[in-house]
């Protein structure tokens, strides 16, 4: 065995012991039976067995750790009379696993497990407070979200699937479509927590920051909230407009940041800036932000509604593919507009790459980016038509149309 390999193994052994010690800090501070020394030695033991290369020893060691943890838990039940606590025993097993991971070369994974486990131990009181404060509907929503994000999403095919529609071969990425469902649910949960804390004013936070992630998904969340609470229409309209502002801000940042070296696309500043500023101004006027308006939402999101939104989004993807297949020869503008139906950021990035390579002029690139942005806004207007509340649909459509006309006018002036 050469010196470099030996040194590497020594470093891993030391790191394993250090991570075990890190895990043991909270246990020691909480005055538990297994503290700094026990967890550090347990982690070191797992690393030693991996370095030795004996799988039977590694398995036997794991069994011994489980047994010792069970004995300590039983001792705590007899001595402390606070009920059976498995946390210390599980902490020992985690420490053993961290040592094995690090010694096996999975250093980042081992550190991640140690840090996350330590956070779970330190935040015990906060986690218990949150858990006990959840309603049945909130627990159900959390469970449904876990199924959407961590069960269904990973089993969907990673590669696009081919579909035949109207005589055309279409490529559909099911993971992208399902990711929209997950995003709608995630934004809904975040918005639920913020609204419970800040009332109607919290919708503004969700609208803008949710729009940075997916402005289209914000519409799905607001559709559900308006259905639950019709009085929240003004705030929902503002959220959609702020999502448009975030989307336009993101596109503007892409257009400028990636074209600085080849000549910044300054032509897009005025029209996209009009969308951003106009959306923010209208959002400020759409609702009374001076008052705290309590919006009592029944649940963070409804699975049926999120799935329905995903179905509509899938139809948009298919329709966009058909349009591109039929009119792709019309050039970049049609392609940018069709791509904007699904992702204005993706369309903007594609146009910027063409501009950087010299394939298109700045004026052409600017118009294509504006078309992609306009298409994204139009999609959100179209999605609001499924709302039972006509006021929500009409107000979003009216404000969006006015902003697009104003942005178009400024684009003409900037050419």
Image (cartoon, rainbow, N blue to C red):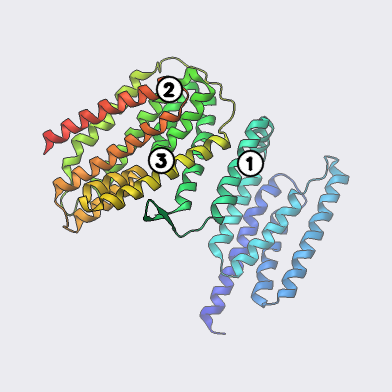
- Whether tag 2 and tag 1 are in contact, CB under 8 A, the answer is no
Question: Residue visible at 85% across and 45% down?
Answer: 77
Q: Residues within 10 Å of mark 3 (few under 14, many from 20)?
A: many
Q: Give the left or right position of residue 353, taking residue 181 as reference.
A: left
Q: CA distance from mark 2 to mark 1?
A: 28 Å
Question: Residue visible at 17% across and 57% down?
Answer: 359
Earlier along the polypeptide chain: callout 2 or callout 1?
Answer: 1
**Secondary structure of the residue carrying numbered label 3:** helix
Give coordinates of residue 255: x percent, y percent: 24, 46
Disc sitting over residue 143 in the figure: 1
- Outermost residue to the front: 167
Is residue 412 something that shows in the picture?
yes
Q: CA distance from mark 3 to mark 2?
A: 18 Å
Q: Residues within 10 Å of mark 2 (few under 14, many from 20)?
A: many
User: Is 7 rendered above or below residue 68?
Assistant: below
Give coordinates of residue 159: x percent, y percent: 46, 60
Q: Which residue is mark 2?
A: 235
Q: Which residue is mark 3?
A: 214
Q: Residues within 10 Å of mark 1 (few under 14, many from 20)?
A: few
Q: Nearer the viewer, residue 259 or 130?
A: 259
**Secondary structure of the residue carrying numbered label 2:** helix
């Amino acid at each position: 065995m050469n010196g470099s390999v030996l040194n590497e193994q020594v470093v891993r052994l030391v790191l394993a012991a250090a991570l075990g010690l890190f895990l043991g800090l909270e246990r020691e501070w909480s005055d538990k039976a297994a503290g700094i020394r026990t967890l550090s030695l347990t982690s070191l033991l797992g690393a030693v067995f991996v370095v030795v290369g004996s799988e039977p020893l590694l398995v036997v060691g794991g069994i011994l750790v489980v047994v010792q943890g069970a004995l300590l838990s039983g001792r705590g039940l007899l001595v402390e009379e606070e009920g059976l606590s498995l946390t210390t025993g599980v902490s020992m097993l985690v420490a053993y696993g961290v040592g094995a991971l690090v010694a096996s070369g999975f250093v980042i994974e081992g550190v991640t497990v140690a840090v996350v486990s330590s956070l779970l131990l330190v935040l015990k009181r906060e986690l218990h407070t949150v858990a006990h404060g959840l309603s049945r509907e909130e627990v159900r929503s959390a469970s449904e979200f876990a199924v959407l994000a961590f069960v269904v999403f990973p089993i969907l095919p990673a590669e696009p699937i081919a579909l035949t529609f109207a005589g055309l071969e279409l490529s559909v990425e099911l993971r992208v479509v399902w990711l929209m469902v997950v995003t709608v649910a995630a934004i809904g949960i975040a918005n639920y927590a913020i609204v419970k804390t800040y009332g109607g004013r919290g919708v503004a936070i969700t609208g803008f920051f949710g729009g940075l992630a997916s402005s289209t998904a914000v519409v799905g969340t607001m559709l559900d909230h308006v259905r639950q609470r019709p009085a929240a229409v003004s705030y929902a309209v503002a959220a959609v407009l702020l999502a448009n502002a975030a989307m336009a801000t993101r596109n503007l940042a892409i257009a400028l940041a990636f074209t600085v070296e080849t000549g910044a696309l300054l032509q897009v500043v005025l029209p996209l800036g009009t969308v951003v500023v106009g959306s923010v101004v209208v959002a400020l006027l759409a609702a009374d932000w001076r008052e705290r308006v309590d919006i009592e939402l029944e649940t963070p999101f409804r699975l049926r509604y999120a799935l329905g939104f995903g179905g509509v989004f899938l139809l948009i993807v298919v329709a966009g593919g058909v349009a591109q297949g039929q009119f792709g020869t019309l050039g970049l503008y049609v392609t940018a507009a069709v791509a904007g139906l699904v992702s204005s950021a993706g369309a903007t990035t594609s146009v910027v790459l063409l501009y950087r390579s010299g394939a298109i002029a700045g004026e052409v690139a600017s118009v294509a980016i504006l078309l992609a942005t306009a298409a994204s806004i139009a999609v959100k207007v179209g999605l609001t038509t499924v709302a039972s509340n006509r006021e929500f649909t009409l107000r979003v459509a009216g404000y969006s149309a006015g902003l697009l006309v104003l942005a178009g006018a400024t684009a003409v002036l900037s050419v």
